[in-house]
Image: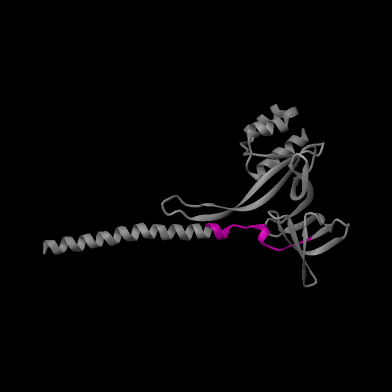
Amino acid sequence: MLSNYLNISNLCLFFIVYYEFFGLIALELILVSTWANGQYFPSEHWHEGYLVTVDSDTLSGLLKYDLENDLVQIERNGRIQTYSSRKMTFFEIFDGVTENYRKFYSIAYSVNIDYKVPRIFEMLYLGELTLLTRESIVQEAASPRPYQVYGRRLKHRFFFVDTESNITLFTNKRSELLDLMAPKSNEMKSYIKKNKLRLDRLPDLVRITAFYNSI
């Protein structure tokens, strides 16, 4: 009887461990799925707005953008038209989720020393030092190994434009930012430290740029 009792106990223990281990995995999968599906990716939605072509025509309708391929689609009168960054100069949308008007420009950008191509940038702040961004959807690990699961998130690459229209890709380095803001670097150091601002967060970088332009 003792042997039977031990076998039953071991079997129960096995099921408890099995349930806890795989139950946690299942729970994590659910949480990761919720995390991934709960993200809002603006480029996957249609937005009310308007677009200005290189011929200076203004077209109003529902817009959907693709910054990775530098394309904009506009739905008008039941038809969808596609414009590349070479065929448009500007578009504006109202993002219903963030409740913000967002402005995008087609700007010539150097891909090497002597070659420029038009790319679509979102204007975050316009001033003596202008802040632009390009967003993309990236896939990354959302759980630790050994049962690694991948999810999606929105990634921003930031660019600064000076008064000479030079566009500089910003790689979120503090020293790089202070070089760009060299005339006012001491004030900027204090402001960033005092307000505990992060250089890789869009709201913080907009705030930093606005402060720089105000002093």
Residue 160, relative to residue 134: is it above or below?
A: above
User: In which quadrant of the rendered image does the N terminus lie?
Assistant: bottom left
Residue ranking furthest to the bottom: 78
The answer to whether residue 195 is magenta is no
* Left or right of 156 in this view: 58: right
| Residue 55 placement (x, y as % from top left) | 88, 57
| Residue 207 placement (x, y as % from top left) | 70, 41
Q: Quadrant of residue 25?
A: bottom left
The one nearer the camera, 189 or 200, is 200
Residue visible at 22% across and 59% down in the picture: 10
* Left or right of 113 in this view: 157: left
Residue ranking furthest to the right: 56
User: In which quadrant of the rendered image does the C terminus lie?
Assistant: top right
Residue span colored magenta: 35-49
**Which color scheme is applied?**
one colour
Residue visible at 44% across and 57% down in the picture: 28
| Residue 99 placement (x, y as % from top left) | 71, 56
Residue 109, relative to residue 68: is it above or below?
A: above
Q: How many marks?
A: 0
Residue ranking furthest to the front: 114
* Left or right of 139 in this view: 43: right
Residue visible at 79% across and 48% down in the picture: 107
The one nearer the camera, 13 or 77, is 77
Q: Quadrant of residue 19?
A: bottom left
| Residue 214 placement (x, y as % from top left) | 77, 35
Q: Quadrant of residue 160?
A: top right
The answer to whether residue 45 is magenta is yes
Residue visible at 70% across and 47% down in the picture: 133
